[in-house]
Amino acid sequence: MNRSLIVLLAALFTQAAWAQTHTITAFLADPVTVLDEQGAPQRDLAKKDTPTQPLTVLQYNPALDLVQVELAGQKVWLDTMDLRIEPPLNVVDLPCLGLTKSQAKSSRNHSTIGFGAGCNQ
């Protein structure tokens, strides 16, 4: 009984240790809008008044694309579009075979068009 409990607790804490924590490394908007949990604006926060140290994301609401952080001892919600979050929250994997290829040669566009290193196209 004790062994199974120890194994279960070890597995639980191992998963928590490996869980990916997201941090806000920069505020992109000026001013940053502070929101409530439904996404309604509460107040504006000037960029000069935002913390310079990275903030840990406490919760993420994917339906509204909001993150909860602690600012000045108060838990508030922020729009992810106003923030630089590391590692990124929403990473979309595009299948290379389903992407439309551009024409091989264009006389009007002299830039390189590709799908990224993962597609090798």
Image (cartoon, rainbow, N blue to C red):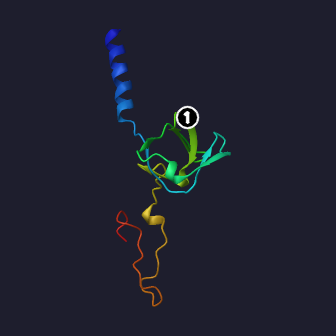
x and y percentages locating residue 66 in the rendered image: 57, 45
Q: Residue furthest bottom?
A: 107
Q: Position of residue 52 (x, y in %)?
A: 42, 48
Vertical side of 77 occupied by 109: above or below: below
Tell me: residue 66, above or below residue 106.
above
**In the image, residue 69 lies at what x, y percent?**
51, 39
Q: How many marks?
A: 1
Q: In front: 91, or 58? A: 58
Q: Residue at coordinates 39% horizontally, 36% vertically from top-left?
A: 19
Question: Splitting the image into 4 quarters, where does residue 116 fall?
Answer: bottom left
Residue reaching furthest to the left: 3
Rendered residue at 39%/30% (across/down): 16
- 93 relative to 68 in the view: left or right: left
User: Which residue sits at x=49%, y=36%?
Assistant: 58
User: Which quadrant: the C terminus?
Assistant: bottom left
- Amino acid carrying label 1: it is Gln
The residue that disc 1 covers is 74
